[in-house]
Image (tube, coloured by chain):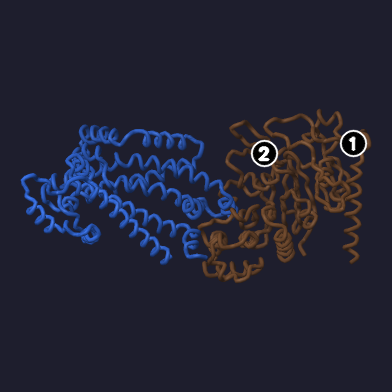
Chain colours: A blue, B brown
Amino acid sequence: MKKYILKRLLTAFFTLLAIILILFILMQLMPGSPFNDEKLKESQKAALYAKYGLDQPIVVQFFRYVLNIFQGDFGVSYKISKNTPISQLIQTRLPVSVMVGGVAVVIGAIVGMLLGLLAALKHDTIWDTLATIISVIGVSVPSYVFALALSYTLGFQLQWFPMLFSTKDMMGSTVLPSVSLSMFTMASIARFTRSEMLEVLGSDYMLLAESKGISGGSLIFRHALRNALIPIITVLAPLIVDLMTGSLVVEKIFSIPGVGSLLVNAIQSNDYNVVISLSFIYSAMYILIMLVVDILYGVIDPRIRLAKKGE
Amino acid sequence: MADYNEKILDIHDLDITFNTTAGPVHAIRGVDIDLMKGETVAIVGESGSGKSVTMKAAMGILASNAAVNKGTIEFTYHHADGTQETVDILEKDKKWIRRHINGKRIAMVFQDPMTSLDPTMTIGKQLIEGMVWHFKTPKKEAWEKAIQLLKEVGITDAEKRMKNYPHQLSGGMRQRVVIAIALACNPDLLICDEPTTALDVTIQAKIIELIKRVQKERGISVIYITHDLGVVAKVADYVNVMYAGKIVEKGKINEIFYDPRHPYTWGLLSAMPDLNTEDERLYTIPGSPPNLLREKTGDAFAPRNQFALEIDDKLEPPMFKITETHEAATWLLDPRAPKVEMPEELKARIERMKKEAEGYEES
């Protein structure tokens, strides 16, 4: 198991390096330089290049870039808020997005699995139909429709939850955006859990377990769920990243100061450094989640864990 | 040896329908099976003849769309204090069957060992699960017992294997594990659903030997569900030949193999591969098993039966008694029926089988 995790970690590290390289090359390919002011003389430009190390060979620049990134230095923003370090910009916004998204993931995964479980266990009954209808709605209706509906009913009419996000009431104001974001995840997980559970429940090993006479509860939780979990985790992983990195529309509706809106701002105002830094952070998060998923696979499925050992 | 006079299982007039999206499928149409303690009974028939369904009904693990229309499945067992009790399994609910019958008194060995073990659980955990549940055996004690069981079914390195996962074992080993799981709670009756079909030939013989040995040592009753007459010849005391949800011929092993009466049994015996046959082509029964979605009047086998009489299409034949133990459901046994002999080729083959058997006994 240790060797398996180590291998995954190494793979993750090199993937990250490759991503930085691609981002770096993209940046180099972009026309112009940070010092495009016509008033600058050649000698002044040279001085500036020297100051920022841009007169160095490109390989040296790359390694410096990598080192800085790993120290948390992403450079400064040019346009959105001039000369503010990007790390500072992200520092305030990323936790908000991760929290709203994280809550959405938890709600979506848990409710989705329960719904799928119910549908599979009560296969071909009214419960199954009901769960299917909910999943179809969840998958096909975009999250901002839920956001508007929720904010109108629970926010405006009933006034249970605040309509706008505020850092003073993080708990309360997370509810509406998280719930609206979780709908898609919930619906996909529900559909997937249902079909996976149905397949597992019809398998020979479930029949054998049933013929042992053990109780219905341990049949489901000890035998069925664990086997159904492997494919479920596979679909859950990319959904997690989607949610964590923030959704622009939902962030706008609830005026959440998250990274989603930061990214759009940066793209619109050609703030390259911010765009690239955010791209890097998204990729890093994706890799991290995939790493966790890979390790979880190993924990859940002995076939993967032991195969990697080289048996 | 076991007491042969005590009836352990008595299936009477069992009738089961499956409600499918295509309509009701009348899978079991009045099945009677008796099993005495310590005996081995084989149920033989083509795929879809209802062999497995009958036995799943006895274990209460029928699919949810199955409906039992009539019949009884009486199972006799002894309580810990020695008192005897007979219950009709069809009248008990799932929970009761789970607690008192499944695994504890009736255990099952399934067809495909590659898929019948939980891939995410160690062999050991799967072995002790039943013991811990039924007898509240402490885990440590159950673990020791499980190691003994693995040794009993011929697995070397039992301690190490306990911590293995199914995918680390070969097919033959897995089937041994499945048998060990079935034996874990000392059942009175072992149902083997095609236990060797998915295994290769060299392993098949070993698994059959293993089941025979276990049966002898423990004095338990065994039901074999199979389509392989070769297996039947090796293991069974009694044979039930099943066709389209009905028993069409039943009798002692010698009666079925040396004096078959039903044309379907003739077909099955003729279809057995044999090196000594003069015909180079392997015999097959013409046609295919009937679609049970559409019920047919008369004998279900009539359309594939070259010896079918006119009445076969109109009236279902009753069971005709040939000896005390031998019965067959074919109108050919009616006194009014024309005298029909089994095919010459089969007759010659039976003669050969008899001679071989005598040869065995002498040597």
Q: Is residue B255 above or below residue B172?
A: above
Q: Residue at x 64, y 44 (%)?
A: B90
Q: Is residue B74 above or below residue A3?
A: above
Front one among A130 and A28: A28
The residue pinned by badge 2 equals B16
Front one among A60 and A81: A60
Task: Classify residue A145 as left or right of residue B215.
Answer: left
Residue B24 in the image: x percent, y percent? 64, 32
Q: Residue at x 43, y 65 (%)?
A: A1
Do residues under tags 1 and 2 come within 8 Å of each other at their CB atoms?
no
Helix, strand or loop status at disc 1:
loop
Front one among B226 and B239: B226
Dividing the picture into quarters, in which one does residue B179 lie?
Answer: bottom right
The alpha-carbon separation of the residues under discs 1 and 2 comes to 28 Å
Q: Residue at x 31, y 53 (%)?
A: A19
Q: Residue at x 55, y 67 (%)?
A: B162
Residue B9 in the image: x percent, y percent? 72, 51
Disc nearer the start of the sequence (1/2): 2
Residue B276 in the image: x percent, y percent? 87, 53
Label 2 is found on which chain of the structure? B
Task: Classify residue A294 as left or right of residue B43.
Answer: left
Please state which amino acid type lies under the numbered disc 2: Ile
Dividing the picture into quarters, in which one does residue B343 lie?
Answer: top right
The residue pinned by badge 1 equals B334
Label 1 is found on which chain of the structure? B
